[in-house]
Image (cartoon, grey):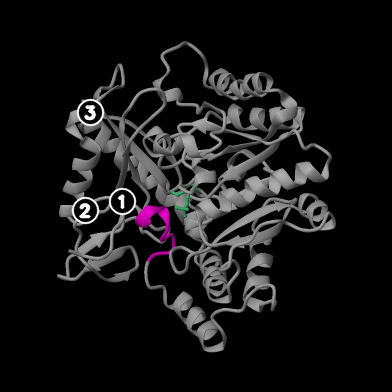
Amino acid sequence: MSNLFYQSRQPRPFLDRGEGIYLFDEHGKRYIDGSSGAMVSNIGHSNPRVLEAMKAQMDKATFGYRLHFRTEASERLATKTASLMPDGLDRVFFVSGGSEAVESCVKLARQYALTQGQASRWKVISRFPSYHGCTLGALALTGYDPLALPFAPMMQVMPKIAAPTCYLDRDNLTDEARGLKYADLLRDEIIAQGPDTVLAFIMEPIGGASTGALVAPDSYYARIREICDEFGILLIYDEVMTGAGRTGRFLAAEHWGITPDIVALSKGFAAGYAPLGAMVARNDIVEAILDAGGFLHGFTYAGNPLACAAGLAVLEEIEREGLVANAARMGEVLKQRLEGLMRRYPMIGDVRGKGLMTAFELVSDRETMAPLPRGMNAYLRLVEIAYGNGLIIYSRRTRGGAEGDHFLVCPPLIITEAQV
Ligand code: PLP
């Protein structure tokens, strides 16, 4: 028996080392890290320049509490991060992971409403399905029943609207009309909840673990922004998975020219070299809160110099190696190859995604998109078969109103065409 435990019993070999897109276990077996872990290791494993930057920081100091010292690493990382954001998103707050980033966004939004004399605003509308993290606050926003329902009595569960699972719809609408139809669900929900009680809307621009790289029609994104503006509601983009270049732009929001009010980042932001995440917000929101006495929120490890040195080196590596553009290019290649498989195997019902956030879904009938029988556990079995063959991919059984088996294929952004 090991003293260590995680979610479930899942015996795995010991990890020995990583190199580029590969991981090696204790027996020397090589695996393609086809999901970058959990969509984390965006610049691949054991990058020497990042390790060098971390060692240099370690030689100076690994921790200095932010109330006692400013650090060059955190200042430089904040400057670099802001420079990569759309205009207007200038202020950066560090955390240690995605759930922390999401909760920080929600608390920042709430405190901002208080500074504006809008104490009645506290509801944060999210989507179903969605994933925003596993801490109780982030879970209250998460639209994934198996994870959320057991804890529902302990949380203020937030209102949800249906995420645009258009590929399942059997209607005669154009893509544009479908996008607007789904976006207008937000309008309906705001009105049903009472507009002066709604604080914010949070969405993954491309649903990750919850939907398997589901991209909405273009019309959806602009309409959501319009609705938020119409009701004075803050728009929070959870780019924990999509951010830092994964989708072929630094933020997925850039694909649609949308500027959210607050953004959550983690995963690829420090690419697995250190536990790190960030919230990036509009300057006026932050200034209003600081003027009113300060942000009532902070994590002990937030902004520690070692994690920030890692994050800075990762962002520099992304720029130096042109990894955002590579994600866009290799994403096209990967999608074409997956579509090739789809032509050969009728069991593949859909191939989707943007950049290197790519997924496919298995179905029992492509015409009706009926899922495979639940008891088949296809989402677990295919992952195990791939693992046995030295390929790591990521799966879940969930989609829109029904259930389906989808698989995320999200290799590190350094991947080459030959490796795809
Ligand atoms: N938000 C999104 C979109 C995610 O995909 C995840 C993790 O998968 C999280 C938040 C939570 O991040 P973490 O597991 O680092 O707390």
Please indicate, yes or no, whether residue 216 appears anywhere in the rendered image: yes
Crowdedness near tag 3: few (<14), some (14–19) or many (≥20) residues, C-alpha within 10 Å: few
Instruction: Provide the secondary structure element on which disc 3 rests.
Output: helix
- Which disc is residue 7 wearing? 1
For the residues labelled 3 and 1, the Cα–Cα distance comes to: 21 Å
Q: Which residue is drawn at 38% across and 53% down?
A: 38
Q: Distance between the residues labelled 3 and 2?
A: 20 Å
* Quarter of the image that includes the N terminus: bottom left
Classify mark 2 as within 8 Å of ligand 1 or not, answering yes or no: no
Which residue lies most toward the front here? 153
Question: Crowding near pointer 1: few (<14 within 10 Å), some, many (20+)?
Answer: few
Q: Residues within 10 Å of mark 2 (few under 14, many from 20)?
A: few
In this rendered view, identify the residue nearer to me: 37 or 14: 14
Q: Mark 3 belongs to which amino acid?
A: Arg
Residue 250 seen: no
Residue labelled with disc 2: 10
| Residue under the point 76% across and 33% down | 232
Residue 275: x %, y % from top left: 48, 65
